[in-house]
Amino acid sequence: MPTGMAATGPHVLRKINAAAVLGALRDADDQTARVSDLVLATGLSRPAVTRALATLGDARVVESLATTSAQVGRPAVRVRFRAELGHVAGVDVGSHRVQVTITDLAGTVCAARRKVPPPNVSGIRLVELVLVALSDAAADAGIDPAELWAVGVGTPGIVNHQRGEVVLAPSMPDWKGVPLVDELRAWLGCPVLIDNDVNLAVVAERWRGEASDNLLFVHWGERIGSGIVIDGKPYRGASSAAGELGFIDLATPIDEEPPQLGDGLGAFERLVAAGAIHAMAMDRCDDGLRERLADGDLAPLFEEAAAGSAAAMSVVDTIAARFARGLATQILILDPQRVIVGGGVSRAGDTLIDAVRAHLRRLLLVPVDLRASTLRENGVVLGAIRMALDAAEERLSALL
């Protein structure tokens, strides 16, 4: 074959048609469709669709569904994508939790497990917890872990997702270079991919949340970071370090030397992250609310603010004003169509988000669509699942 000439022939055409029909079927409601629906969706002739379905059926990728129609004449043939043919896993790993979710090839959840790491957990212990959680979730799903088609992992820190390693994790100094991906690949024998947790939360928002081609997602919890989508494409930066909002310094006077931060927290995180909110509430609120906040849960603070407590409202307004100042720096540079706020603090809902909106109006040149994430704490693991499903496509294509 001359150099540069594409492969041709009936077998190539059959594979192309089969892929087109499979794509249309997976895009259909409940991933089921009639042959006539697939003809319309693909633009192929009915015989071509029928041949493609035969190919897919031989590969066990689709199956025909029984019909109960009482109509006269030949009943319409309906087919279904066999999503249970394979499974993938999404992993959200950090110093405060390890979450594993297993889905079928349609992204339908089959099982989920969550582990709470001990304080000051080591990197090696975190790897062990991931392996245990993954093994337990696989058992709940009724599969052997070695049957997984792909695994996606979300982690804090700066990640070289091509090499599969964490190159910097300020909040988890023992996590840099830990061979989690190598351990999983050796154990499972399937593709294992890793990316920054906030980058994966953006993927999840575009998949299951508030899709936008120009999107800024801000994770607001114990740490603060952002994921960026520009013209439909994730933006990571030259060193995969774009979006580290938590390290913006709004507190140090402009002519003074910034302080050295030895605990891994960024300057902005010291102002508005969950720990800072908790400390301010304990300082400003009365004994009754302080007692309710003793375990670190911020929900009582926002409940009191929504009920009209002056002290709680003061905390919320101060935090919202500070957060708006930092967020405005990114919005003014990126001009996103939409800003989604996720993470644990976002669970405060309108009580906090409305206050942030009010302060942002005075800082921006153009209004922005600011919303709380509807995915809550599941954003990272959903993004990891989407990454794993994309990796599983190669194996699915090989079956055709």
Image (cartoon, grey):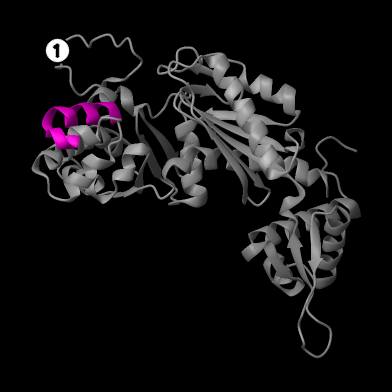
Element type where label 1 sits in the image: loop
Q: Residue at x 20, y 38 (%)?
A: 320
Q: Amino acid at mark 1?
A: Asp
Instruction: Choose between 309 and 246: the one closer to the eye.
Output: 309
Q: Is residue 43 magenta?
A: no
Query: Is 312 displayed left or right of 54 in the figure?
Result: left
Quadrant for residue 274, please give it. top left
Instruction: Choose between 188 and 41: the one closer to the eye.
Output: 188
Quadrant for residue 186, please give it. top right
How many marks on residues? Answer: 1
Q: Which residues are magenta?
A: 274-289
Query: Is 323 displayed left or right of 381 in the figure?
Result: left
Question: Quick one: label 1, few (<14), some, or many (20+) residues within 10 Å?
Answer: few
Q: Residue at x 32, y 9 (%)?
A: 262
Query: Is 152 displayed left or right of 228 in the figure?
Result: right
The residue sitting at the bottom extreme is 72
Using the image, determine if residue 45 lies above or below residue 208. Answer: below
Q: Magenta region, mostly helix, strand or loop?
A: helix
Instruction: Choose between 114 and 196: the one closer to the eye.
Output: 114
Q: How far from the left and from the top, in percent, is residue 28? A: 64, 64
Q: How far from the left and from the top, in percent, is residue 337? A: 35, 49
Q: Which quadrant is the N terminus positioned in?
A: top right
User: Does residue 235 show up?
Assistant: no
Q: How far from the left and from the top, in percent, is residue 104? A: 68, 48
User: Does residue 288 show up?
Assistant: yes
Q: Name the residue that disc number 1 marks.
A: 255
Q: Residue at x 68, y 44 (%)?
A: 141
Q: Residue at x 53, y 19 (%)?
A: 166
